Amino acid sequence: MARVRLSRLRKSYDGRTDVLAGIDLDIAHGEFVVLLGPSGCGKSTLLRLLCGLEPITEGTLEIGDRVVNDLPPAQRGIAMVFQSYALYPHMTVWKNMAFGLKIAGQDKAEIDARIRRAAAILKIEHLLERLPRELSGGQRQRVAIGRAIVREPQLFLFDEPLSNLDAALRVQTRLEIAKLHRQLDATIVYVTHDQVEAMTLGDRIVVMHEGHIQQAGTPLQLYQQP
Ligand code: ADP
Ligand code: ADP
């Protein structure tokens, strides 16, 4: 798992207005950082810069001990979990989880071992032969998380992963993600606009406002501030 460092990270889509106005952020190995803020403050943009889906306008992004500004997404050692699951509808759970690894040329025994481990952590062993449409929303999101785990990334990115789930499943999946963090010793950047999620999951909460970091601290530190 990796340390992540953002230095004066700036993003402008149109060359005039800054959506991210020079973000400085240092994320420790194994830390769970929540980006919290209202819609439009730049959270998703920041995630897209981290995983390489959008070019950085200015500044430096380091993952591990490498500057990754110009590295394509597949080489950054990152796995992302989206709110919409994005599972392949015609593939079984097993194949959904195996797909990325096959493309990357992993051998079958290794793919199999990784899927078994991830399925055990997420308690989805009994779902491996099912198609996504045969799963509940919560199960689908667990599979999406499983697909991220098997890649053994240096860094996990979560983009509002609970927002499509009902209240009970939100709580359950939230506990699942917290457990994952402890078990895998994973470095996680997690985006949400939900204060309860942020307070219960984050080692540190980074509050964003209009492309800036407004404040940052542990849940306790933020709670004690006026
Ligand atoms: P959040 O995830 O916090 O809701 P976003 O990163 O999606 O915020 O958006 C931040 C700002 O950047 C918004 O003003 C949004 O309209 C703008 N924006 C996001 N994506 C694009 C894009 N592809 N092109 C132009 N502007 C964008
Ligand atoms: P195809 O229809 O493309 O031949 P298969 O269903 O045979 O795909 O699966 C491709 C590979 O994935 C096979 O080698 C198979 O052994 C393996 N595989 C598929 N599902 C599972 C599973 N649940 N457990 C272990 N291996 C599986």
Image: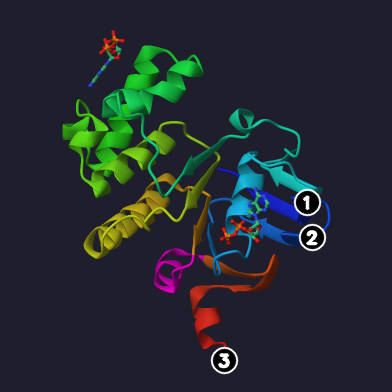
Amino acid marked by disc 3: Pro
Residue ID at (48%, 67%): 193
How crowded is the residue under tag 3: few (<14 C-alpha within 10 Å), some, or many (20+)?
Answer: few
Residue 217 lies, with reference to residue 110, above or below; the image says below
Estimate the spatial distance between the alpha carbons at disc 3 and disc 1, rounded to whole Å: 36 Å
| Ligand 1 lies under 8 Å from the Cβ of mark 1 | yes
Q: What residue is disc 3 on?
A: 226
| Residue bounds of the magenta highlight | 193-203
Quadrant showing the N terminus: top right
Q: What residue is disc 2 on?
A: 17
Q: Number of numbered discs present?
A: 3
The mark lying in front, picked from 3 and 1, is 1
Question: Are discs 2 and 1 less than 8 Å apart at CB?
Answer: yes
Report the predominant secondary structure element of the magenta stretch. helix
The mark lying in front, picked from 3 and 2, is 2
Viewer-proximal residue, 192 or 75? 192
Q: Is residue 47 magenta?
A: no
Q: Position of residue 141 (x, y in %)?
A: 32, 45
Question: Hey, which quadrant is residue 132 in on the image?
Answer: top left
Viewer-proximal residue, 155 or 161? 161
How crowded is the residue under tag 1: few (<14 C-alpha within 10 Å), some, or many (20+)?
Answer: few
**Which label's residue is closer to the chain start, 3 or 1?**
1
Q: What residue is disc 1 on?
A: 14
Residue 199 lies, with reference to residue 191, above or below; the image says below
Amino acid marked by disc 1: Asp
**Which label's residue is closer to the chain start, 3 or 2?**
2
Find numbered disc 1 in the image and state the secondary structure of the residue it sits on. Answer: loop
Q: Position of residue 154 (x, y in %)?
A: 55, 39
